[in-house]
Image (cartoon, grey):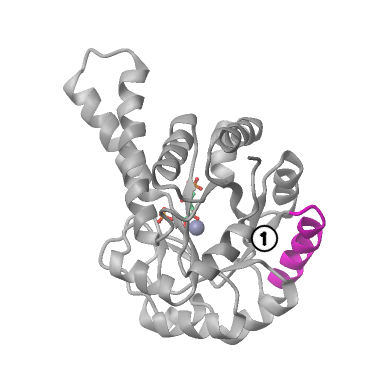
């Protein structure tokens, strides 16, 4: 099978009331871990690459790995640009064969965000590529947020309605209290806000910063309309912990395969658990 768009994966998730896992990849071992996990769980899956991942691996390697993965896999695989912050970067990904892109205009004013997102949707739609937009600011865990600042950071449901209507995005990433990276305490998700955003937009929602969010909160978010769940940090943790363990146990080891092989297995197991949690196991 070739790469599929997230539009079709999320439409099926909508019907089945589950979420598709979107897992960040930076190298071959992580791509393989994601695909092995999806195959083992018979789940549709989204490989996603950030601008940093593209800088690290090179766009041609990322696309070649994803294409090969999709060609070999018995489950549907999408390749999605994660947090494309720049119009030109998004266009480059479309030209190189990404089946889906995120345009993250969240640092702009509402008007500017709508304008750039709309432009991307028009072009992407013409070539069968799906688009995720972001509204509100999803933090990094280094940013502590005061309750009084919530309104400034979190997505306003009325603005979300306007954003979706005017841009035509296939999926929306709202800011409802999650953050990228490791949490210091328990994250506090604003479920009433999520519910309102879903009611007013009616489209598949995306949960960012999902590593470290308790399982019951992930389930609740899916019950309220989240159809794509992004995981990066938990994969990094598992991958690097296994590398550390192998290096610690075998300080004389010089064969990278002996270090990276177990890291790939550890990442695969974490991803399998996530897929089961999201309800997408057996849905391919
Ligand atoms: O949303 C952020 C992802 O975890 C990607 O992180 O920009 O370090 O690749 P990165
Ligand atoms: P985490 O690293 O917190 O899992 O977030 C991933 C993400 O949202 C990628 O866009
Ligand atoms: Zn994100």
Residue nearest the viewer, comparing 118 with 75: 75
Picture residue at 72% right of the left edge, 71% below the top: 168
Residue 193 sits inside the magenta stretch = no
User: Residue 113 at what x, y percent from top left?
Assistant: 69, 69
Relative to 65, residue 201 above or below: below
Which quarter shows the N terminus?
A: top right
Q: Is residue 8 above or below residue 59?
A: below
Name the residue located 54 percent from the left edge and 69 percent from the top edge. Answer: 14
Is residue 249 visible from the viewing direction of this image?
A: yes
Quadrant of picture, ligand 2 = bottom left
Check disc 1 and report the residue beneath it: 131
In this rendering, would 281 be left or right of 158? left
Task: Give the x, y percent position of residue 44.
Answer: 51, 51
**Which residues are the magenta region?**
112-128
User: Dot 1: few (<14), some (14–19), or many (≥20) neighbours within 10 Å?
Assistant: many
Displayed quadrant of residue 252: top left
Question: Residue 176 lies in what quarter of the image?
Answer: bottom left
Residue in front for this viewpoint, 186 or 164: 164
Query: What secondary structure is the magenta-colored segment mainly?
Result: helix
Q: Give 19 or 92, whichever is nearer the viewer.
A: 19
Q: Could you tell me which residue is drawn at 44 percent across and 57 percent down?
A: 280
Residue 179 place in picture, x, y as percent: 41, 63
């Amino acid at each position: 099978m070739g790469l599929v768009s997230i539009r079709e994966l999320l439409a099926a998730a909508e019907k089945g009331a589950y979420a598709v896992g979107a897992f960040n990849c930076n190298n071959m071992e992580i791509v393989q871990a994601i695909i092995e996990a999806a195959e083992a769980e018979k789940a549709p899956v989204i490989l996603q690459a950030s601008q940093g991942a593209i800088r690290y691996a090179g766009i041609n390697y990322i696309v070649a790995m994803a294409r090969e993965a999709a060609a070999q896999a018995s489950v549907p695989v999408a390749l999605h640009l994660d947090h494309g912050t720049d119009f030109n970067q998004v266009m480059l990904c479309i030209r190189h064969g990404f089946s889906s892109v995120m345009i993250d205009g969240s640092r702009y004013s509402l008007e500017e965000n709508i304008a750039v997102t709309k432009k991307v949707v028009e072009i992407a739609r013409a070539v069968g590529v799906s688009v995720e937009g972001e509204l509100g600011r999803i933090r990094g865990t280094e940013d502590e947020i005061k309750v009084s600042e919530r309104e400034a950071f979190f997505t306003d449901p009325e603005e979300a309605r306007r954003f979706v209507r005017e841009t035509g995005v296939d999926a929306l990433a709202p800011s409802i209290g999650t953050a990228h990276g490791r949490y210091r305490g328990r994250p506090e998700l604003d479920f009433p806000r999520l519910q309102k955003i879903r009611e007013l937009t009616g489209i598949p929602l995306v949960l960012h910063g999902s590593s470290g969010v308790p399982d019951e909160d992930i389930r609740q978010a899916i019950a309220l309309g989240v159809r794509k769940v992004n995981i990066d940090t938990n994969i990094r943790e598992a991958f690097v912990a296994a590398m550390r363990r192998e290096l610690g146990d075998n300080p004389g080891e010089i064969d990278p395969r002996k270090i990276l092989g177990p890291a790939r297995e550890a990442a695969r197991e974490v991803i399998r658990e996530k897929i089961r949690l999201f309800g997408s196991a057996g849905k391919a």
